[in-house]
Amino acid sequence: MTIDNKARILEGALNVYKTKGVKFTMDDLANELGMSKKTIYTVFPDKGTLLYEVVDYTFDSVNELQSKVVNDPELSLIEKLKTILGVLPDAYVGVDFTQLYVLKGKYPKAYARLYERLENGWEQTLELMDEGVKQGLIKDVNRVIFQLAHEATLERFLMGDELQKNKITYEEALRELVNILTEGIIIKE
């Protein structure tokens, strides 16, 4: 199986997840992709492994987009900071990430990986914050508290049902979170 087929299966899993959530079956995925379950199982031995890889695939896409944002000369430092805090690749718009709490009970390795990926990858954000402080654009806030606030809120979005109950999409919640966090640290002129 080629890397392209692995990526195709991961993308297919995300597409099926959009409509069925974590409870999608491997039959659903096979139908989505127009391939046999046997072919899928040659790449991913079980659904838990697939979901673990989907977590990495999703976060790798986010990290790639964050790098593009950080290196975009057209964006101001504040625009870069806001964008990387709320980055969501176009392919993931409409994905209901709030259903991921199901992973904890049924797919604990995928859940642990999700939790681990939420806590890592802060280097670019913290560098932007340091530069923002040097330039006098943002307050010199405690980075640990800032990071914990962002992570804890995202975890709550992902692991609870409050967004669903209040008919708030993950994208809307993420946008609002970034606005609250950044407007609270931007120095007003």
Image: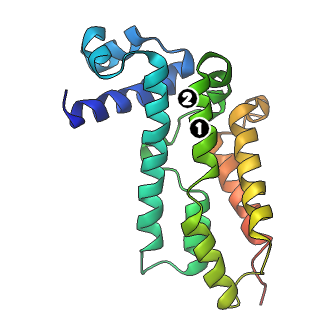
Examine the rendered structure and indicate whether residue 45 appears above or below residue 156: above
Q: Nearer the viewer, residue 147 or 21?
A: 147
SS for callout 2: helix
Q: Quadrant of residue 178?
A: bottom right
SS for callout 1: helix
Residue 147 image offset from top left, x and y in percent: 72, 60
Q: Amino acid at mark 2?
A: Ala
Residue lying at 24% horizontally and 14% vertically, measured from the top left: 39
Q: Quadrant of residue 183?
A: bottom right
Residue 114 image offset from top left, x and y in percent: 59, 37
Mark 1 vs 2: CB contact within 8 A:
yes
Crowd band around label 1 with a 10 angstrom C-alpha radius: few (<14), some (14–19), many (20+): many
In this figure, which residue is indicated by the disc labeled 1? 114
Q: Which quarter of the image is occupied by the C terminus?
A: bottom right
In this figure, which residue is indicated by the disc labeled 2? 110
Examine the rendered structure and indicate whether residue 64 appears above or below residue 81: above
Residue lying at 65% horizontally and 39% vertically, measured from the top left: 169
Please count the marks in the image.
2
Q: Which quarter of the image is occupied by the N terminus?
A: top left
Residue 78 image offset from top left, x and y in percent: 61, 77
Q: Quadrant of residue 165?
A: top right
Examine the rendered structure and indicate whether residue 126 appears above or below residue 33: below
Q: Using residue 104 as the reference point, say whether residue 54 is left or right of it.
A: left
Residue lying at 71% horizontally and 90% vertically, measured from the top left: 136
Crowd band around label 2 with a 10 angstrom C-alpha radius: few (<14), some (14–19), many (20+): many
Residue 83 image offset from top left, x and y in percent: 56, 64
Q: Using residue 20 as the reference point, say whether residue 42 is left or right of it.
A: left
Residue lying at 51% horizontally and 42% vertically, measured from the top left: 93
Q: Which mark is residue 157?
A: none
Q: Amino acid at mark 1?
A: Leu
Q: CA distance from mark 1 to mark 2?
A: 6 Å
